[in-house]
Image (tube, rainbow, N blue to C red):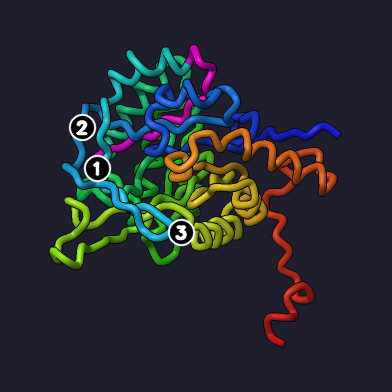
Amino acid sequence: MTSDLSVSIGAWRLTNPLIAASGCFGYGVEYADAVDLASLGGVAVKGLFLKEREGHPPPRIVETPSGMLNAIGLQGIGVHRFVAEKLPELRALRAAVLVNICGTTIDEYVELARILSDAEGVAALELNISCPNIKEGGITFGCSLTGTHAVVSAVRKVTRLPVIPKLTPNVTDVASFARAAEEAGADAVSLVNTFLAMAIDVETRRPRLSNIVGGLSGPAIRPIAVRMVYECRQAVRLPIIGMGGIATASDVLEFLIAGANAVQVGTANFVDPLLWPKLLAGLQDYMQRHGLTRIAELTGTLDTSREEHAWISS
């Protein structure tokens, strides 16, 4: 039996549902010696502003139980250097490129979208409106329903590329933000970004991050992220890219069954940069064992029938 791992995110067709997550895979080219980028469904590159950005001073990464805290501060080379230096390499490597864009104003998001829409080799735009460790810009829009709608709507008007806002989990009702994005014309949503968190050195009584707070990622957040994907699947018809603590094929399958059409894998890259073939093999094995021909058939197939869960109340 042939396993069809392809999925569609709006007009963007991916060869498989595995995307390298923004911020954990550099610009993609850094991993080219270890990973065949063409074998991935997509590569979400490090977040780009219009201009270069230094980010926060160290320390800006801290390991936590079952996770990692980061406050990189969206350090980056800026969109113009990316288009001139990195994008040609990604094209040569046959990577499907999802560009994560960041801004402090709606006009900045619009200008980034215009520039990248004219650049050869960009498959889709991911709007970073959810980074928890910078004080200005994106997160302000991402924590406001009207702000989310405004950014998505403005970018939608200037590009034909798929527009995919990345939603924050640091709100009380993430599904309402997915609805706002859908109403504004988004082609899909990706969720979740990292959870606002902090760690303290008890001997010095100082924060372990220079920024004091940062974003928590890794296996610790996965059950919460799966729940949020499930909630959004109940609220919108848009394709969903799920993420949060994925490290195994079983983790990928959880997100798909909960309602995701594709996934992003981030923090696990730091632990095992060679995990991608293992994930693909695990998905193929599952499909063969369950008699599935298309991975897309799994999306949103969670069985919540009362009979299956009678043991909960017994």
Q: Which residue appears at 20% of the width and 62% of the height?
A: 201
Residue that label 2 marks: 53
Q: Position of residue 147 (x, y in %)?
A: 33, 50
Residue 185 visible to the viewer: no
Q: Specify whether 28 is left or right of 227.
A: left
Q: Is residue 292 above or below residue 307?
A: above
Query: What secondary structure is marked by label 2?
Result: loop
Query: What secondary structure is marked by label 3?
Result: helix
Classify residue 280 by image quadrant.
Answer: top right
Q: Specify whether 268 is left or right of 115.
A: right
The span shown in magenta is 91-105
Q: Which residue is nearer to you in this view: 152 or 74?
A: 74
Residue 168 counted in the magenta span:
no
Residue that label 1 marks: 73
Residue 102 counted in the magenta span:
yes
Q: Which disc is residue 221 wearing? A: 3
Quadrant for the C terminus in the image: bottom right
Three-letter amino acid code at disc 2?
A: Arg
Determine whether label 1 and label 2 are within 8 Å by CB.
yes
Q: Which residue is nearer to you in this view: 64 or 25?
A: 64
Query: What secondary structure is marked by label 1?
Result: loop
Three-letter amino acid code at disc 3?
A: Ile
Q: Position of residue 6 (x, y in %)?
A: 68, 33
Q: Which residue appears at 55% of the width and 58% of the height?
A: 226
